[in-house]
Structures are given as C-alpha cells and as structure tokens.
Image: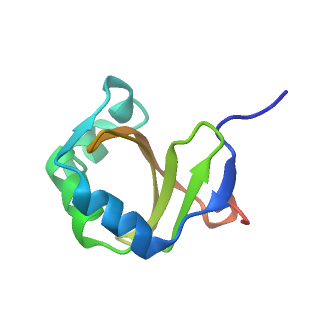
Amino acid sequence: MFDSTKIKKRADIEEFFRLIRACSEIECTPHAFFRLSKKQRGILDLEELERILQKEVPFLAGIQYNNNYAIFYRYKNKILKMILKIIDRKINIVTFYFIQEWQIPKI
C-alpha cells in the first residue's frame, strides 16, 4: 500500500521561508492538538506555533506524497515535527508532535 504521508523530496529551507512569508493566515486544524498532553498544550499553543514557523529555522523540511510539508525543528532540547497544508496563502497546521532522534527521516 502506498503511504501518502512519506516524504517524497527534501524542500529547500529558504524556499520554504519564502512560502511561509507569502502566507497571510495560520491556523490549526482540530486534529493538531490531539497528540499532546495537557501540559504540552499549555506550552505549544497557536501563538507559539506561529512564532516557531515565522522565526525558527527548521533543520529539515520535506514535501510528502500528499503534498503536505513535514517540517522538523529543534525545540527546547526536543525534536518537533509539524505537518502543514498550505493552500492559497493559508497555512493549516495539520498536526505536530515530538519525535525521537531515530524517527528523523533519511531523505
């Protein structure tokens, strides 16, 4: 079975930043917070996610087969993975969660 959430190619970080800067709206889907504990929800709200997207430099960005972006950040001594759907200058944060070092894809 074909896995549409696998990364098909690495995205250029500068190109990704241009795309983010061109967007006028950022929102979270209802699915975005479901993996987080209550404590994590208190730390990672929409405002903090917006700050990360606009100010932090990801160490890896990739485009999945379903055309969503998988973005990886080093955040407070952890690895934060965000899945973004970008359509018509609008960013939807589909989900985000912390992963282990061994879970970083090799692309």
Q: Quadrant of residue 41?
A: top left
Quarter of the image for residue 4 reads: top right
Quadrant containing the N terminus is: top right
Location of the C terminus by quadrant is: bottom right
Q: For the point 34% across and 70% down, which residue is it?
A: 76
- Tally of numbered discs: 0
> Is residue 58 visible in the rendered structure shown here?
no
100 to 5, vertically: above or below: below
Q: Is the image coloured rainbow, by chain, by secondary structure, or in one colour?
A: rainbow
Q: Nearer the viewer, residue 69 or 95?
A: 69
Write the residue at 42% across / 69% down.
Answer: 15
Judge left or right: residue 30 versus residue 95.
left
Residue 62 rendering spot, x and y as whole percentages: 57, 58
Q: Position of residue 104 (x, y in %)?
A: 64, 62
Residue 17 visible in the displayed image? yes
Q: Is residue 79 above or below residue 88?
A: below
Q: Where is residue 106 in the image (x, y as percent from the top left)?
A: 73, 66
Residue at point 23%, 64% (across, down): 54
Q: Left or right of 38: which side holds 4?
A: right
Left or right: 36 in relation to 107: left
Horizontal arrangement in the rendering, residue 48 relative to residue 15 (left or right): left
Q: Residue 77: percent from the left, percent from the top?
A: 41, 73
Q: In which quarter of the image is residue 34?
A: top left
